[in-house]
Amino acid sequence: MGGVRTTERERVPKQDRSRATRQRLLEAAVACLAEHGWAGSTVAAVAERAGVSRGAAQHHFPTREDLFTAAVEYVSEERSLALRALFPDGPADRRAVVAALVDLYTGPLFRAALHLWVAAGDEDQLRPRVTELETRVGRETHRIAVELLGADESRPGVRETVQGLLDMARGLGLANLLTDDSARRERVVAQWAALLDAGLG
Amino acid sequence: MGGVRTTERERVPKQDRSRATRQRLLEAAVACLAEHGWAGSTVAAVAERAGVSRGAAQHHFPTREDLFTAAVEYVSEERSLALRALFPDGPADRRAVVAALVDLYTGPLFRAALHLWVAAGDEDQLRPRVTELETRVGRETHRIAVELLGADESRPGVRETVQGLLDMARGLGLANLLTDDSARRERVVAQWAALLDAGLG
């Protein structure tokens, strides 16, 4: 009995350590991808950046594709949670919601995801993984957008209105890639939030 | 006098040949960028693809940056001309115009431009060239959109409505990168063309 308790006690911190290592690797992978692109992103480079041995990194993520798709998914989930936390009472002021949705597509995560998308266009091993990831993340973002905008998808056109908004948000992310586009973006967001208000009723 | 005429006669075909070579290089450069990305796109690879000697290619485009930014600009101009030619009488049915604008961002040119953008994010030599190119091409596309949509930019919000539409078109281009998104895209275009119609008055 005493022996079992000791084992349990030892196991918990070990699981915690393993989870913390995994998380450090995922965050380092997104940062690496955002800064150096797919060509400069390897499991070894990420392990070094995270301060984790290469062996430990490979234990968590056997292949490069595993590591980077898991990283983009993990950070996307974190951002989705943060977005929901911004509006804890559900449907909110539409301009604020549109601005927050657009913010999902600026910053290092979007840059990292973009590198992954573009690389997936050229690499057969990566393409199905990224396509599947994009479908999953896209669905979840759509679900959050519908909820926070208080959109009634049973009405004709509402689904496509929300989809087009998220397409616009992605396009704004692209426009911000090389220069700081925030002033223009703010004006576009204000105007499109008004159009959306009319479209969603 | 006779000597001058002979020289003129010889010069014209030579200029034509030079222009044709330049054009072949530009088209090959866009195709190369779309297929192999920035890492796989060199002046030598494009010369080979275009069936032009490496020396001749370097005569036209001394650096890799010269060749690929010129290529994206050239093909963008060609597409702008083709877009205007679709609507020779100016302002036209808005759904048709929105669909044609969105079409600018699908296909090999968008794929090539995206590779160039993403590479420019990481390369200091390329960034100012691509930023300047994007500003120029973006302004011209905006001008055409305003004209074909019959949008009155003196009215508040109209400028931002058109800008947001072009951002949406770019986002739809991204969504089409890994999978054929045309069915969904058509529904989004129909819905936003209707919202835009209301927004533009």
Image (cartoon, coloured by chain):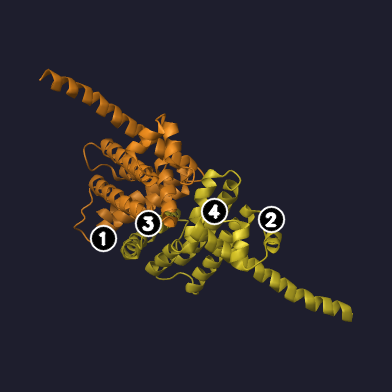
Chain colours: A yellow, B orange
Q: Residue furthest top?
A: B2
Pointer 2 and pointer 3: residues touching (CB < 8 Å)?
no
- Whether residue B186 is visible here, answered yes or no, is no
Name the residue beneath numbered marker 1: B157
Q: Residue furthest right?
A: A1
- Whether residue B144 is visible here, answered yes or no, is yes
Name the residue beneath numbered marker 3: A175
Q: Residues within 10 Å of mark 1 (few under 14, many from 20)?
A: many
Q: Is residue B3 left or right of residue A64?
A: left
Pointer 1 and pointer 2: residues touching (CB < 8 Å)?
no
| Amino acid type for the residue under numbered disc 4 | Glu
Q: Secondary structure at mark 3?
A: helix
Q: Disc 4 and disc 3: Cα gap in Å?
A: 20 Å
Name the residue beneath numbered marker 4: A134
Camera-side residue: A45 or A190?
A45
Rendered location of residue A84, percent (x, y): 51, 70
Whichever of labels 2 and 3 marks the residue nearer the N terminus, that label is 2
Write the residue at 22% across / 26% down: B11
Camera-side residue: A137 or A126?
A126
Name the residue beneath numbered marker 2: A62
Task: Tell me which chain the residue with mark 2 is part of.
Answer: A
| Amino acid type for the residue under numbered disc 3 | Ala
Rendered location of residue B94, percent (x, y): 29, 45
Q: Disc 1 and disc 2: Cα gap in Å?
A: 51 Å
Q: Secondary structure at mark 4?
A: helix
Task: Tell me which chain the residue with mark 1 is part of.
Answer: B
Whichever of labels 2 and 4 marks the residue nearer the N terminus, that label is 2
| Amino acid type for the residue under numbered disc 2 | Pro
